[in-house]
Image: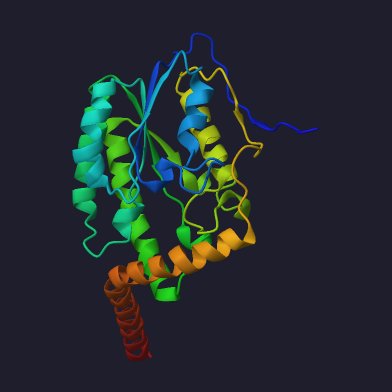
Amino acid sequence: MVVKTFFAVPVFPGATRVTSLVVLGDSTAVGVGDPLPAGGWRGFGPLLAAALGAPSELRYANLSIIGARVADLRYRQLPCAVATRPDVAVISAGMNDTLRSDFDPLTLRDDLDVTVTGLQATGAVVLITRFHHHGQVFRLPGPLRRALHQRIGQLNDAIDQVVACRGALCLDLHVTPGTYDTAAWSVDRLHPSELGHRMLAAALASMLAGAGIAVPHPVDLTCTDGRQLTAADHLAWLVCRGVPWLVRRSRDLLPYAAAVVLRDLFGRSRRYRRGGAAR
């Protein structure tokens, strides 16, 4: 017998029924980490759509692109999203920006702001994910980890500014229960596993319910229909994808990581000199 586990959502009288859901974002929004037996990815999008309504009642569009940056949301995904006139729009993007040498938090904030306001102009409730500390689930050398941590902080600051200015909903993954559980992550530790995607869908559904959106069907957290990965799958990913990815991203992050190290050393040196002078 399979024991069903569900993520409870609050029920409010007169909640608004959703007839259209759109997802914008990068590989996590595509569903990477939650492979289907027949191929392709599922992810949190279809799970959230199923929680909001039956397929005959709800139009669902996932416009996400693997490798997308926030600028891609503004210039490539937003026009199609607006055309769907969604009731709810979920945005999950920004990590690809933090891993690039041309990372610019001000431009990122402006691109996100245009995306959010464009969606809100259609009447959509916009829900954005705010990011956790990747260094707690994905192991990197110290300088790269500190560099990435600072970048994610700047990304979250940009998200916070847009959320505060535009009144969008925001799911903070850092404080979402289960975010740092190993089982919530796929082998690459960058994308959620099937369980992680189910947990993400459940958290998004709960937040929407709290905002007065009807969630008639709870998200099932039982992993039963995704493709189960074997040790061979993990090894293949490490050799074919993991190591090459780390090399590429290290090239982008290394100059910034070196600057972080130099600032740390310079700061410690100045504090030491001041301490010596004080004595």
> Which residue ends up furthest to the top in the rendered image?
14
Question: Picture quarter containing residue 84?
Answer: top left
Q: Is residue 113 visible in this depiction of the protein? A: no
Q: Which colour style is shown?
A: rainbow
- Residue in the foreground of this view, choosing between 129 and 268: 129
168 over 265 or under it: above or below:
above
Q: Is residue 96 above or below residue 87?
A: below
**Residue 121 pos. (x, y %):** 22, 23
In percent of the image, x 24 and y 33: which residue is there? Answer: 78
Instruction: Quadrant for residue 271, please give it.
Output: bottom left
Residue 37, position as x, y percentages in the image: 57, 42
Task: Please tell me how many numbered marks the rendered image carries.
Answer: 0
Residue 247 located left or right of residue 189 = left
Relative to 24, residue 137 above or below: below
Q: Nearer the viewer, residue 247 or 142?
A: 247
Question: From the viewer's perspective, is 275 left or right of 34?
Answer: left
Q: Residue at x 21, y 30 (%)?
A: 79
Most foreground residue, 200 or 68: 68
**Extreme residue toward the right, this view:** 1
How far from the left and from the top, in percent, is residue 70?
Answer: 26, 46
**Residue at position x 47%, y 42% in the image:** 41
Residue 33 place in picture, x, y as percent? 50, 49
Q: Quadrant of the N terminus?
A: top right
Work out which residue is located at the far front of the displayed protein and give it. Answer: 38
Residue 23 is at least partly visible in this image: yes
- Work out which quarter of the rendered image holds the C terminus and state it: bottom left
